[in-house]
Image (tube, helix red, strand yellow):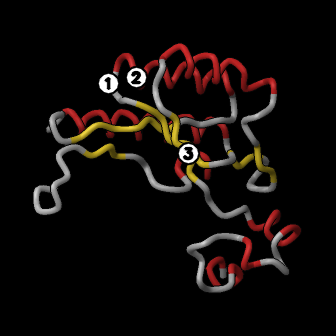
Amino acid sequence: MDEVGNEHQILSWTSHGAQGYSDPKEAEAVARRANDYMSEQCKKNPKRFSGFASLSMHDPKQAAQELERAIKELGLVGVILNDFQEANNGTKMLFYDQPEYDPFWAKLQELDVPLYIHPRGPIKEIFDHMWKDRQSLLSAYILVPYAELIS
């Protein structure tokens, strides 16, 4: 960090994060553990590191509660989400623009912290339906056919 003049860095869990777990209880537990770990690591050198929380987005009210815990109790400074939550054994994508997510958005606004929505590739079932013949539209960083990546 010193070599390139980076004084402070915000750390986050990489894609797919908790959004890659289609089981709600597993996703919640993984996000909670990730947030605890992130907080522990950032507290080792708070002048250099801050962290973004990870959340399961299966249950918007639970996500709001974990967000509040991560910010107020753990000292994290924002949240990172991937652009959809896997559900139904990886066959469904949950998006956060539905009315049931209003409690989450209200909590985020109340806490006044940043949200980073990180893109990710689609789940296989959706890929096969929507992007099979349009792989060039899938992502700027995938250089090999998606079928090769998942095989």
Say which amino acid is labelled 3.
Answer: Ala
Residue 44 or residue 112, whichever sits in front: 112
Q: Is residue 124 left or right of residue 11?
A: right
**Which is nearer the N-term, disc 2 or disc 3?**
3
Residue at 54% across, 19% down: 65
Which label sits in the foreground, 3 or 1?
A: 1
Determine whether label 1 and label 2 are within 8 Å by CB. yes
Name which quarter of the figure residue 28 lies in.
Answer: top right
Look at mark 3 in the image and give the residue it sits on: 18
Farthest-out residue, left? 2
Mark number for residue 75?
1
Look at mark 2 in the image and give the residue it sits on: 71
**Which is nearer the N-term, disc 3 or disc 1?**
3
Give the x, y percent position of residue 34. 41, 41
* 134 relative to 72, above or below: below
In the picture, the quarter occupied by the C terminus is: bottom right
In the picture, the quarter occupied by the N terminus is: bottom left
Say which amino acid is labelled 2.
Answer: Ile
* 99 relative to 34, above or below: above
Give the x, y percent position of residue 21. 62, 49
Count residues near mark 2 (Cα–Cα under 10 Å), then give few for <14, some for 14-19, many for 20+: many
Say which amino acid is labelled 1.
Answer: Gly
Q: CA distance from mark 3 to mark 1?
A: 19 Å
Give the x, y percent position of residue 100. 78, 24
At numbered mark 1, what does the secondary structure look like: helix, strand or loop?
A: loop
Residue at 20% across, 32% down: 43
Determine whether label 2 and label 3 are within 8 Å by CB. no
Farthest-out residue, top? 110
* 100 relative to 6, above or below: above
Q: CA distance from mark 2 to mark 3?
A: 17 Å
